Image (cartoon, rainbow, N blue to C red):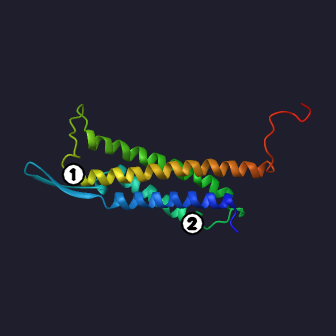
Amino acid sequence: MVKPKRLLSLLLRLIAFGATLAAVIIMATSREKGSFFALSYEAKYSDTPAFKYFVIANAIVTVYGFLALFIPSESPLWRLVLALDLVFTMLLISSISAALAVAQVGKKGNSSAGWLPVCGQVTKYCNQVTGALVAGFIAIITYIILLLYSIYTFLNSLLGKTPCRLSSPGI
């Protein structure tokens, strides 16, 4: 029988795996041809280094998330998983920060720099990028919850699974 703690961990890892996989697929397939006056162009994720970083980071975390599903919680490797959860959470946060900054410029433009918004010409592309960013946010939130849960579980086992007492026994 599966323990409830292990079931919660598996559920969170499956959600995180699905969210990172969805972010990769949605972003990697985002492309659309558009035109501005007589100029024709194609908008695709690979034209932007921040979007490439987002795809690569989410792909790495997807592979890690898949492999972590098969590590038993009693394994000595679980401490490594806790450390890697922290590293990959930070990787996801940095990648979505970079991608979000570029997406904001694409959507709103930057009048100070003279950059025009492009989402009016390539709405399907911008909608796909938005979908990938939403999936990325779901992955980050899930990994943060998973990280907090893993830290709680680790500290609980380290301290001997005794509840924390706020007062001394004589009081």
In the image: residue 99, left or right of residue 39: right
Residue at position x 68%, y 48% in the image: 152
Residue at position x 47%, y 51% in the image: 138
Three-letter residue code for mark 1: Val
**Which numbered circle lies on residue 60?**
none
Three-letter residue code for mark 2: Leu
**Which numbered circle lies on residue 67?**
2
Screen quadrant of the N terminus = bottom right
Structural crowding at the residue carrying mark 2, measured as other residues with C-alpha within 10 Å and reported as few (<14), some (14–19) or many (≥20)? few
Residue 105 lies, with reference to residue 40, above or below; the image says above
- x, y (%) of residue 31? 26, 58
Residue assigned mark 1: 122
Q: Nearer the viewer, residue 149 or 81?
A: 149
Nearer the viewer's eye, disc 2 or disc 1?
1
In the image: residue 142, left or right of residue 28: right
- Mark 2 → mark 1, Cα distance in angstroms: 37 Å
Residue at position x 46%, y 46% in the image: 94
